[in-house]
Amino acid sequence: MREAVYLDTSGWLAALSPREEGHEAARQAYESLVHDAARLVTTNLVVAEIHILLTRRHDAATGLAFLESLYRDPAHEVRFVTRSLEAGAMRQWIRPFADKPLSLADAVGFEVMRTEGITRALAYDRHFQDAGFEMIPTEKRA
């Protein structure tokens, strides 16, 4: 079975956008995952975050190209957030980590990872490490 890796906004955006800090390491990690045919799992919350960031930092055409590319590629699996998934994220992550400023998008990502047995994330957000997941790329951003 192919390895599944979670795509977080922090790492995925860095991989896609040369303007982002840590771009080269994230790009290489992302390309390696694609080359190794990993299952690339994310949520529609992350897709929405990346779309607006690409649109604002580049232009609307870049945001649209991201969406079109994403939905043409079967290696990218988008989990759509349900009320049940949000409730699990609150129960498993937001309440227990009340001392950390977790976003709902991160907590939902953690819950997807937990329920699907995903242990690694393309992420620069240290909350993934705090939650017990492995971050790739492992080196810090510049």
Image (spheres, rainbow, N blue to C red):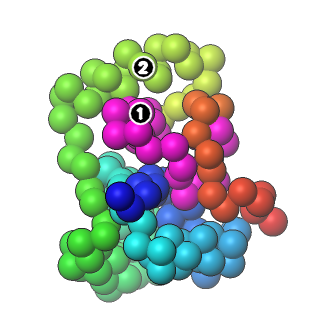
Q: Residue at x 48, y 74 (%)?
A: 36
Magenta span: 105-129
Q: In which quarter of the image is residue 34?
A: bottom left
Specify the principal SS of the magenta part.
helix
Q: Do the residues labelled 1 and 2 touch (CB within 8 Å)?
A: yes
* Residue that lies at the very extreme toward the right in this rendered image: 142
- Helix, strand or loop at label 2? It is helix
Of the 4 image quadrants, the one containing the C terminus is bottom right
Number of marks in the image? 2
Percent position of residue 106, x then y: 46, 39
Q: Position of residue 4 (x, y in %)?
A: 41, 55
**Viewer-nearest of discs 1 and 2:** 1
Q: Disc 1 and disc 2: Cα gap in Å? A: 9 Å
Give the residue at x 52% y 14%.
96
Asked if residue 114 lies left or right of residue 120, the reply is: left
- Residue 115 relative to residue 33: left or right: left
Element assignment for label 1: helix
Q: Can residue 96 be seen in this view?
A: yes
Residue beneath disc 2: 92
Q: Report the residue marked by disc 1.
A: 114
Res 57 seen here: no
Question: Residue at 77% across / 60% down in the picture?
Answer: 139
Q: Does the magenta stretch include residue 120?
A: yes
| Chain-order first, disc 1 or disc 2 | 2
Left or right of 23? Residue 110 is left
Amino acid tagged 1: Arg
